[in-house]
């Protein structure tokens, strides 16, 4: 993995306009059925196509592109860097009831005993700046007799091809984020900032000041010993260290790799890759090659445009698409 400090990357050449979030590509055994599912659940989404592939358009000009495959793609949410993706919804409590009636809610476990809810606002409120509670913090919430807010919140539904989709409110409906795992979360944030001019994630809720900027010397941070809840798994989720960036308002946020083996490359899995648009592909290719970033696909024609594909710090495929 190539890794430059932000200062070193900026000193090499004038900054290029940062990429914009363009698309999320999913592998699907039945793109038509998959598209119909997303349009039904998120009605602001419209049907379209992109460079010969069936696609959906979100109101924020982000696409979901479907690539038809002969057999069901690997959808293990812990196998690669791409964990799940999410939508803002206008009223998450109303969406909760809609999804519950359709029996597509994913259990959001509130503890390791297996209790679960369908939305975060039906369990204990989070501590400041942390989207979950450790065992000790759960015990503290019980001791204080804390009560759920029953307002807003986020939850998950199960979609076509084994997709896990987060819904979160309350905002105008749009594709909001891709949630990820990274082998070294803080180093990954530095990688995205240095190589792709990404906007770093904001400080956590309740933080008095942003954390110090990561450096090559300080970015490797061990995974926290304690998981926290609510979680999509009964065993909890390790949420520290964390990191993330955004491209044109779409977040790519991550927690540490939940297992002990390195994350697998994303190509061929359910979430195959993320696409970013750039105005000058040649300039970006030259920049990234000078920085020794790994290329999975060299620049090539793609319908009426051109594209190239690089590899992120934990094997995630990232397509650069030229959009003039």
Image (tube, grey):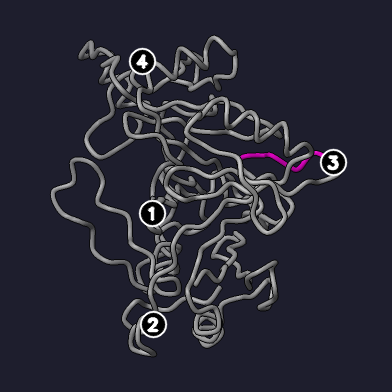
Q: Nearer the viewer, mark 1 or mark 3?
A: 3
Whether residue 170 is situated above or below residue 149 in the rendered picture = below
Expressed as whole percent of the image width and height from the top left, the position of residue 19 reads 44, 67
| 75 in the magenta segment | yes
Q: Earlier in the sequence, mark 4 or mark 1?
A: 4
Residue 9: which disc? 2
Residue at image coords 50%, 30%: 42
The answer to whether the residues at label 2 and label 4 have Cβ atoms under 8 Å apart is no
Residue 94: which disc? none
Expressed as whole percent of the image width and height from the top left, the position of residue 66 reads 68, 46
Expressed as whole percent of the image width and height from the top left, the position of residue 181 reads 52, 49
Residue 243: which disc? 1
- Name the secondary structure under disc 1: strand
- Name the secondary structure under disc 4: helix
Q: Which of marks 4 and 3 is in front?
A: 3
- Name the secondary structure under disc 2: helix
Residue 122: which disc? 4
């Amino acid at each position: 993995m190539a890794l430059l400090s932000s200062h070193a990357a900026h000193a090499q050449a004038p900054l290029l306009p940062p990429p914009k979030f363009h698309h999320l590509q999913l592998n699907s055994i039945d793109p038509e059925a998959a598209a119909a599912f997303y349009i039904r659940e998120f009605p602001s989404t419209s049907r379209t196509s992109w460079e010969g592939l069936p696609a959906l358009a979100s109101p924020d000009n982000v696409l979901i592109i479907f690539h038809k495959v002969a057999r069901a793609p690997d959808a293990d949410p812990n196998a690669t860097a791409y964990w799940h993706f999410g939508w803002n919804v206008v009223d998450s409590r109303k969406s909760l009831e809609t999804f519950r009636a359709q029996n597509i809610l994913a259990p959001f476990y509130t503890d390791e005993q297996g209790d679960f809810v369908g939305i975060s606002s039906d369990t204990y409120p989070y501590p400041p700046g942390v989207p979950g509670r450790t065992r000790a913090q759960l015990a503290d919430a019980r001791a204080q007799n804390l009560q759920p807010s029953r307002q807003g919140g986020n939850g998950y539904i199960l979609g076509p091809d084994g997709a896990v989709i987060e819904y979160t409110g309350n905002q105008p409906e749009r594709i909001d984020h891709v949630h990820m795992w990274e082998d070294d979360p803080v180093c990954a944030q530095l990688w995205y900032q240095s190589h792709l001019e990404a906007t770093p994630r904001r400080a956590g809720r309740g933080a008095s000041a942003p954390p110090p900027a990561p450096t090559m010397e300080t970015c490797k941070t061990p995974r926290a010993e304690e998981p926290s809840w609510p979680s999509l798994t009964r065993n909890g989720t390790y949420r520290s260290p964390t990191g993330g960036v955004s491209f044109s308002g779409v977040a790519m946020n991550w927690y540490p790799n939940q297992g002990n083996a390195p994350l697998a490359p994303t190509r061929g899995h359910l979430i195959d890759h993320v696409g970013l648009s750039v105005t000058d592909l040649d300039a970006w290719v030259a920049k990234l090659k000078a920085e020794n970033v790994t290329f999975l696909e060299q620049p090539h024609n793609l319908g009426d445009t051109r594209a190239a594909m690089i590899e992120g710090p934990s094997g995630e495929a990232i397509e650069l698409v030229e959009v003039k």
